[in-house]
Amino acid sequence: MANLKKSALMIQFIGKPSKIDWRRLPMFDKLLNFHRFDLKITPQTAFLIRSGNDDIEPNKIDMEFVRIETPYGRTVYIPGSSLKGPFRNHVGTLLKGMEKNVCLLERGNDCKEKLNKRSPALENYNKACYACRMFGSTEFASIVRFEDFFPYRLNDTPDQKARSIKSIEKYSYVRHGVKIDRKTGSASRNALFDAEAIVGGEFFGTLVMKNPEMWQVAMIFKAIEDINLGLQKIGGMKSRGFGKVKIDIESVNVETFSDKITFFDLKNGTLSLQPSIKPSDGLFSKSYKFTDQQIEDYKTMVYGNLKDW
Ligand SMILES: [Zn+2]
């Protein structure tokens, strides 16, 4: 079955002149590496991830921080999707600045119209813009996936988790505001609103990249640097000064299937890095764990080895 599928793809690529070398196709389907970034997010200003239940109950505040029931208590948290949006947005801006194709930032440029469900995955990937290659599109999955972030670490004890949930609530406060009519610049009618914000505490979670190209790992490092500079904010009420956060990379874990860290690369086939630290052996793979200065060294290595992409 697998062979049949492959030969069908080959015919398609031989039949249609294309810049893609079909011999690279298996590389695209083959899992070469996983990157897992363990992150800590610390709000630096008021911070609000809005709950979807806004404005339903009249007696509640207008904009509430999103909460979820956990075995350790009901807690504020950051859904992964609330992080992916700002990352996609900022990486898109960076890519555009480097004159890479990014759809939706200009009229009539929408990957959705170029991609075809029946085309081979690599063909769609090649046609898609850089942002869609990294963050997904209707026709293929995102390389980047954010898990939900909680006020505790996953390997904390249940007691520690319950304490962290209680402790972050002391940073919750409600800000009263006045809605400004954008046209007239004055306060609009029915204009008072309340917004809940978290102004301290820490959230922990993981960003996973499945089979990224090397430039995509570089973009994640760069986006985190820029978020820490305040160039991209996260959550609601950004125009009111909310949403500056600090993101600490606590560790970068790379699963790889050879001694080197090998990446799929659309232009070059594959690219490899040879870190100076030794990987540990797993059942099927080797894994590198970078912490502290090793993270900076790995980032420098990634930045320094980007070929034309
Ligand atoms: Zn696109």
Image (tube, helix red, strand yellow):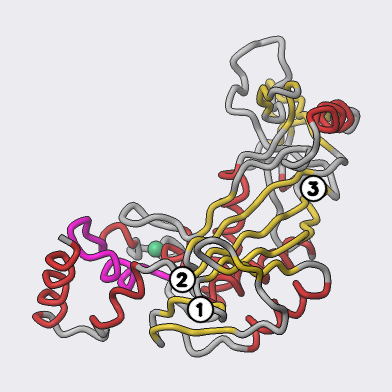
How many numbered callouts? 3
Marked residue nearer the N-terminal end (3 or 1): 3
Name the residue nearer the viewer: 231 or 227.
227
How dense is the environment of label 1, judged by Cα within 10 Å: few (below 14), some, or many (20 and up)?
Answer: many
Q: Say which mark, if any, is on residue 262.
A: 1
Residue 265 vertical position relative to residue 121 in the rendered view, above or below:
below
Instruction: Name the quadrant of the N terminus.
Output: bottom left
Residue drawn at 22 percent across, 65 percent down: 120
Q: Quadrant of residue 164?
A: top right
Q: Is residue 256 magenta?
A: no
How far across and down, in percent of the image, does residue 2 sit? 19, 63
What are the residue bounds of the magenta stretch?
114-130
Q: Say which amino acid is labelled 2.
A: Leu
Q: Is residue 223 visible?
A: yes
Residue drawn at 58 percent across, 63 percent down: 282
Name the residue nearer the viewer: 270 or 48.
270
- Answer yes or no: do the residues labelled 1 and 2 have beta carbons within 8 Å? yes
Residue at numbered disc 2? 32
